[in-house]
Amino acid sequence: MNSSYKQYIDSVKYKNGKKYIYGAGKVGQAIYHLCVENEIEIQGFCVTNTEQNESRIEDIPVIEFGSSIEENSVILIGVLEHGKSVIKEYINKYGNYQVVDCPDGILYTTQYHHNKMINPTLEITPAIGCSVNCKYCPQEVFLKEYFRKDNKRKKYMTLDDFKICIDKLPKNALIEWAGFVEPFLNNESIDMMQYAFEQGYEMTLYTTLIGLTKKKLMKIISMPFKQVVLHVADKDGYANIPVTDEYLELLEIIINAKKKDGTPFVDNANCQSEPHPKVLEKTKDKIRIYGEMSDRAGNLENKDNKLRGGEKCGRIYCERAVNLNHNVLLPDGTVVLCCNDFGMKHVLGNLLKEDYDSIISSEQMRLVKRGMNLDESLSILCRKCMFAKNLK
């Protein structure tokens, strides 16, 4: 066991009092599994609002934090760094508790997240221009830069071009349908997904359901995605997701769908404010809906102080991809550094014209690495990114 995790387990194990985890998402669940492995009994997952969470996780109750949690209980913080201070303030309102901070890198105790951090990942942007146009997504920045030199630049990835690019990837690469657009705005995206599965690649899916029909959705549910994340409609309309009868029908189908192993097809969901009331009617007690927003490495202005951001000094690394190999493929084969590079600051190459090794060892990649490790005078996106961490 990692020495920092051993210290964490020892500090938790020898505290008297009932033990709860504050946070029911992937961080809280990673802490739960770490505790179970070390024979630490957890009474429940605590959350601020039960409406946006499942009612039980692995048969452990999810409860609203409040006076029902007896004082002097041990509260294990189970959220990412930026949410800790808010939760601690909230806990202090209710009395005296023994609060234990979340250990660094807790997500990477799971094999899936560890592999994702180390192995190559390619996010697919199969179309240019996202009709969902979320308030906290810098689409305008991306479109301006993509078409800056050529207003007729390719807008849709073709199946043939996708095959050329995918066939150049290492077989341990993870393919993510995320990138800078709702994937189903490209009519060939399902065929692309099917091809990638046939070639033996693991894939994850991030979707708003926009662009899907019931027939297409049933095809998607039959595919063995490693992880599925759903972006749902919000009450403020920050995401342009029309809450129609058709949308609610698709939402109900996907929320109740199961994978072959019997687990829910959707692993978690997110939202840019509070979920739309009609969404909550469908999702209550079934799935956690979380809200986590950033300034996209400085590509958004934090006008209403709701975005996570900030600038890092000193030597840094990317906690999502230690080898900087979590990149984004655009419709014309262009590969940019990462999911926050909406301004296309770091263009690594073109996968239609070059091989994969040339792209990840390109001059632009070398510049980024120098900027992270040696030369702070170099202008790199990573210094403003929420996934950047200081080397200790």
Image (cartoon, grey):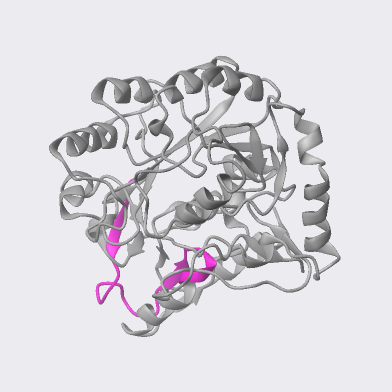
Front one among 207 and 27: 207
Question: Which of 336/386 is in front?
Answer: 336
Q: Is residue 60 magenta-colored?
A: yes
Residue 134 on image: x %, y %? 37, 54
Q: Residue at x 24, y 38 (%)?
A: 251
Query: Which residue is depicted at the point 68% across and 24% down?
Result: 171
Q: Position of residue 194 (x, y in %)?
A: 48, 18
In depth, the one of 173 and 5 nearer the eye is 173
Residue 326: image location, x then y, percent: 65, 43
The answer, for residue 99, to whether it is visible in the render is: yes
Asked if residue 6 shows in the view, the reply is no
Q: Residue furthest top?
A: 198
- Give me the residue at 39% from left, 84% from top: 96
**Residue 359 sits in quarter:** top right
Number of marks drawn: 0
Location of residue 379 in the rendering, given as x and y in whole percent from the top left corner: 74, 65
The quadrant holding residue 153 is top right
| Relative vertical location of residue 117 with respect to residue 170 in this rendering, above or below | below
Q: Is residue 76 above or below residue 347?
A: below
Residue stretch in magenta: 59-83
